[in-house]
Amino acid sequence: MKKIVYAITLLASLLGIMSSCSNTEDILFDHEQPAFPIQADKILLEAIMPSSTTAEEDVYIVGAFNGLDDQSVIGNADYKLMVADSIAGKRGIYLDPSKFVGGKTLADGYHFVSSTQRNEVTALGDTVVRSESPAVGTRTNMYVSKWAAYFDPAPTEPTHDGYVVYVDNQTTWGDAITMYMWGDVNDLNGGWPGMKPTGKETKNGVNYTYFDMGTANNGLTEHLIFSNNGASQLNDFAYTIDHDLYLKVTDAGVEEITNEPKHDGYAVFVDNQTSWGDAITLYMWGDVNDLNGGWPGMKPTGTQTKDGVVYTYFDMGEANTGLNEHLIFSNSGASQLNDFAYTIDHDVYLKVTDSGVEEIKQGGDDSGNTPPSTYKLYIDNQTGWAASALYVWGDAELFGTWPGAQPKTTETVGGVTYQVWEIGNDNATYHPILNNNGGGSQTDCPTAITASRDYYYQVTATGWTEVTPPSAKRSSLLYRASIHSRR
């Protein structure tokens, strides 16, 4: 009898736990934990900052309620948010409605401002005007998605005169560093102590001081002497002006930076935005069939970061220079994309997705500028729920607070109708949760997604499965039929 009573008690406890877990109002993520105590006569606003917010910059609140603007609020201690000690990235402020001006309230509009990155904007760059007006004695959690500075155009890369010597200047000399050259031509680009830096440039997160060699000097062999404008000097460094050179220069000496891989001939650089990951392979046919390997072709040679983009690359081989080939990318043969014609006489940069291949410029899209205005999350919704919403947390609450947003549109890809949510293009990290519009049921995406490519998922009430869009699938039988017809 005791065992029966114990079992009933245990079952009741478990049901109680399950019941409490199904209540969406009880869901509280770590970043939503309180960071400041409530004050009975104040409004407490707690805000999660964008990941780009540094510890050194200040954040303020501005609106009709305090009569200030984005410029005049900077430095006003009354409206500066406090940095939370317990939760990284969170700040808070107490507001006293009795000090609001002109009879205004928070409902009349307000927003947050960074001392260095200007006003807050949405994840897609739109202006933010908040109107939530909480009561005194309450705490309200908020998210700042982005600062306006995030969407400023990237600095224009300098146009160089010939090859370049890039110097990671770790000396104590600062801008007084000079470079003298002797060799095939003495006093090249100037007599002792030599030329001053041409400029500064940031590449892959490193701030370089650089010296342009001059196109007319291509091919010369020179000896580089760095000095503190002649006051002290380092040992010579031999250099043939036929490539860009990266050096780390300290007070003690000169060292070549050799992080960049040495390629065998020209290379195919792939911005791999497929769902295949490391399973991507490259088959080639044309002047030489099965070049670098029979179907499904060669595996990647390695990865390399250029202008902030991590590329998967395939070295073509010096002996294959000049050949005309057709490139076929596949998921180790399980699925394949349309051919891409390529003459092996230059490095080529490609963006490869589950649906196709597109030539791009290094570090950008086909125009060399910016990626698409937004990537998308496609969901083949097989949950059976009458209505669905997507809640997304991570670098921002992308679609607002729980339960998130319902899809604004659908798209049919390869005969499958997907619900579509736009996720931006800023490489932010997100965790999606599909739910029945706050009705108590939900299913979490098992892995984080980043706003750097499109995603396709089939979602049931019990889980998520990433899929390849049907339009991108081609059977290996079709491949073999087509390849044999070319031979």
Image (cartoon, rainbow, N blue to C red):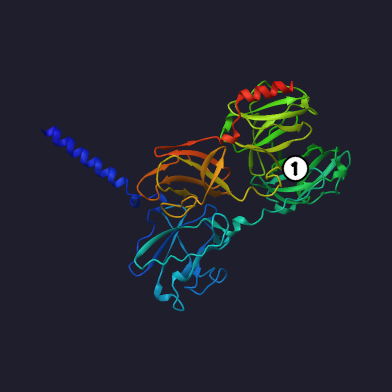
Residue pictured at 39% horizontal, 57% vertical: 35
Give the farthest residue toward the left: 1
Three-letter amino acid code at the position of disc 1:
Leu
Please state which of residues 429 and 436 is positioned toward the viewer in this rendering. Answer: 436
- Judging depth in this view, the residue of 255 and 338 nearest the camera is 338
Q: In which quarter of the image is the C terminus?
A: top right
Q: Can residue 224 be seen in this view?
A: yes
Q: Quadrant of the N terminus?
A: top left
Q: Can you tell which quarter of the image residue 280 is in?
A: top right
SS category of the residue bearing label 1:
loop
Residue 192 vertical position relative to residue 341 in the rendered view, above or below: below
Q: Position of residue 108 (x, y in %)?
A: 47, 71
Residue lying furthest bottom: 102
Q: Mark 1 points at which residue?
A: 234
Decide: few, some or many residues near mark 1? Use Cα within 10 Å; few <14, some 14-19, many ≥20. Answer: some
- Horizontally, residue 363 falls left or right of residue 473, namely right
The reply, left or right, for residue 113 in relation to residue 158 is: left
Q: Position of residue 3 (x, y in %)?
A: 14, 32
Task: Give percent across and percent down for residue 297.
Answer: 66, 24
Q: In this view, does 407 lie above or below 56?
A: above
Left or right: residue 61 versus residue 257 is left
Residue 73 position (above or below residue 231): below
Along the viewing direction, whichever of 473 and 60 lies nearer the viewer: 473
Residue 112 rendering spot, x and y as whole percentages? 51, 63
